[in-house]
Image (cartoon, rainbow, N blue to C red):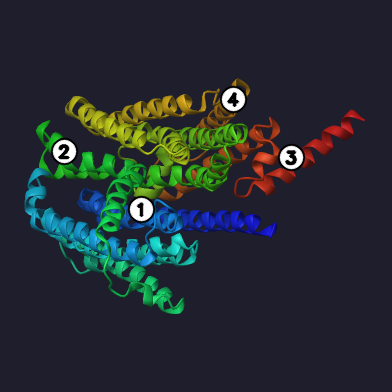
Amino acid sequence: MAEKPYKTSRDIFRGALILSAAAIIVKILSAAYRIPYQNVAGDIGFYIYQQVYPFYGVALTLSTLGFPVVISKLIAERGSSENDYTIKDILSTALVVLGSIGLLLFMALFLGADWIAGIMRDPELSGLLKIIAFSYLLMPFSSVLRGFFQGKNDMIPTAGSQVAEQSIRVVTILVLSTLFVHMGYSLYDVGKGAVFGSITGGISGLVLLFAFVLLRREWKLFKPMGVKRPHFIRISRSLIFQGFAFCVTGLILILFQFVDSLHLYSLLRGSGMGEGEAKGWKGVYDRGQPLLQLGTVVANSFALALVPVISGFVRDRNDQEILGKVRVVLRVSATIGLAAAVGLMATMRPVNYMLFTDSKGTVTLAIYSISILFTSLIMAKAAVIQCLGHSVAPVIITLIGVGSKWLLDLALIPRYHIAGAACATVLAFFIMTILFYIVVKVHIKKPLFEKRHLYIILGSTACMGLAVLLFNEAFRWVMPPEESRMLATFQALGGVGMGAVIFLFMIIRTGLFTEEELALIPAGLKVKRLIKKKNRGTENVDE
């Protein structure tokens, strides 16, 4: 009997790691495909796709993060004195409520596509929006099935369906866009082929989920049945309010893209740019999106891996352990986020040329890269706040951040164009970072960073950045001055690789993380062995 709690805790942590691994794969796929797509469709083609992507991003977030988490929470808490409903009550109510939400969102986007495209000042986007609208019809079924399996702590179906959905979507995007370009279709038709991937991907993920229902012999739970009115009201309220609250942190990046989609192009046109020029520069600005996603995926995945550990200590009311683990989460996020931001800024010119065929917008993208630090910290702090049981603060802060982004865009874009949009993004994320820090500090009531750790992080990053800048200067001195994508690739990969080695060496040698802390994060044990070797060498010298 004594072993049961241990097994339960171990299973929960294992499930969290499975979902974290799936999230990493999904984020990498979601970011990486945009690079070949931009190479195929060009900056204007990339602009077309990025204008409508946020509408799909909302559907994806609702079906993977918001509603499944609440459904799983309701299933896990059922049977208590307050929650005396059954799994069938939860699933039946969820299908009705989410089905209604999905249908309403579908109709709003499909019927309002012309109006939304008009707001964007690009009527030809209407067709792409109508295709994306069908994603909202798939969302209710995916959400209910994922939430059901997660509530039983069976994470394989959810993880498998997410990876399958993104894999099929990416394949569809790259195959159809390449085919349509070679067949001479317009860039808007190429964009329609790309967004059609949201449908093929969604259907693939849903088919896999249904397959797991059959394999697990769970179909009886999905037979229609009546739900008591009080139960229906309580479950519906939890789904709607908690579901959207859980979605907010996952929607932060997408909401910022929404702001840019709605008025960056129109503001560029208003500043005197022609139609083609404004579309092209919006496409150049959108190059920052995959860089931001790839830059934050490592920091976010490390932080998420520690979330179940923090949640366990919150349940046990172990304040000392909560403080220790929160500090680790923030230290990991700050370390990787700052290193990624500075490293990318230092290598932006060759990276831009290597990935996107030319060096347009290098300064803008360098500014935009600062966002990696702030978004890494924002995601980590938001996760901590939710672990502590506070879901309202992230919603309020996110709304403040989106509002700040909107106002800063209006002030900066007419004068500084896409560089102004990048500055607006960085400043809005900075405001959110400060607000999230204040909320965490209020609840923890202890210093969240030690000065020694801050000095190590800043010093290691400065050494890395300086080394990369010197490498770039030496490379330009040795190599011919004419631009070459091959040379840019060598320079980018060489600079990034050298910077990573120097940075890791610095933080290991200075002892930024203890062996126990490294053991909590993925791949930490390998670094732990390096520290042991260093310590053994030090002991031999002392002797």
Q: Residues within 10 Å of mark 3 (few under 14, many from 20)?
A: some
Q: How far apart in space, not on screen, are marks 2 and 4 (Cα)? A: 40 Å
Residue 120, disc: none
- Front position among marks 1 and 3: 3
Q: Position of residue 98 (x, y in %)?
A: 25, 59
The residue under label 3 is 531
Q: Residues within 10 Å of mark 2 (few under 14, many from 20)?
A: some
What is the residue that sits farthest to the top in this orientation?
Answer: 451
Residue positioned 46% across, 48% down in the render:
489
Q: Position of residue 53 (x, y in %)?
A: 25, 52
Q: Are marks 4 and 3 in contact (CB under 8 Å)?
A: no
Q: Disc 4 marks which amino acid? A: Gly
Q: How far apart in space, not on screen, are marks 4 and 3 (Cα)? A: 19 Å
Q: Earlier in the sequence, mark 2 or mark 4?
A: 2
Element marked by disc 4: helix
Residue positioned 33% across, 72% down in the render:
222
Residue 263, disc: 2
Q: Position of residue 317 (x, y in %)?
A: 57, 37
Q: Position of residue 402 (x, y in %)?
A: 26, 34
The residue under label 4 is 459
The residue under label 1 is 35
Q: How far apart in space, not on screen, are marks 1 and 2 (Cα)? A: 24 Å
